[in-house]
Amino acid sequence: MSRILIIEDEKDMAAGLRDNLELEGHDVIIAEDGVNGLRLAIEKQPHLIILDIMLPGQSGFDVCKELRARDLDTPIIMLTARGEEIDKVLGLELGADDYVTKPFSLRELLARVKAVLRRYQSEEPAEKFRQFGTVFIDFERYIARDERGEIEMTHKEFELLKYFFAHKEQTVSRDDLITKVWGYDAYPTSRTVDNFILKLRKKIEPNPARPVHILTVHGIGYKFIP
């Protein structure tokens, strides 16, 4: 049984989701605004958070950003009413794991919940500490350092590196990264993956213009060389 936190201000929707998730065997907590949602996420340590973007008090974006800033890697499914690409991209860049656009079918959301929980619960524990070049990574505390000091990295950038380490010296496609790192069916564009890689290179490569760790495999994807 998983503990799921729903942060949603539409009471009927929250109650409907709670009832159906409880029928699936989950323990469900509800928060009706961002402030209480953030507090419950920290106190209750749920296995999954279903997070609406438009919330009173504190937006879903703010809640997601604060959770990742506190190094809480609880998977997050964001709910957006507008379906605009910029909302989806921003949510994912802040560390969300998936998104569902309102109005959505209950069947779709339940399938997403199962997929995200299965992915996180089936992952083998990664090695806590990794090093390549002058970069040191602590995957447990989400800390990165080099000889200049701490490197500011997003949750998703850590997840990208974790996946790269698990597939070091192998060519991984953009579709692989979309499926395994972001873990949802339709990412807006593969170019956004390239933008993530570009930002990550600027943080970890000695010369981002001539990368030696994250190499481009033209027409396919990338290869990570520790």
Image: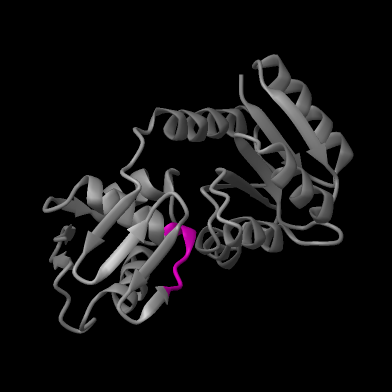
Percent of width and height locating residue 167: 19, 47
Side (left or right) of 38 relative to 92: right
- Camera-side residue of 123 and 94: 123
Taking 52 as reference, is 108 above or below it? above
Percent of width and height locating residue 119: 43, 33
Taking 118 as reference, is 104 above or below it? below
In the image, what residue occupies the spot 55% across and 53% down? 96
In the image, what residue occupies the spot 38% across and 49% down? 181
Q: Magenta residues, as a range? A: 151-156
Side (left or right) of 115 relative to 87: left
Q: Quadrant of residue 212?
A: bottom left
Percent of width and height locating residue 177: 31, 51
In the image, what residue occupies the spot 44% across and 68% down? 153
Q: Which coloring applies here? A: one colour
Q: Quadrant of residue 194?
A: bottom left
The answer to whether residue 117 is visible is yes
- Camera-side residue of 102 and 56: 56
Examine the structure image and report whether residue 89 is included in the region drawn in magenta.
Answer: no
Q: Quadrant of residue 193?
A: bottom left
The answer to whether residue 188 is visible is no
Side (left or right) of 106 relative to 56: left
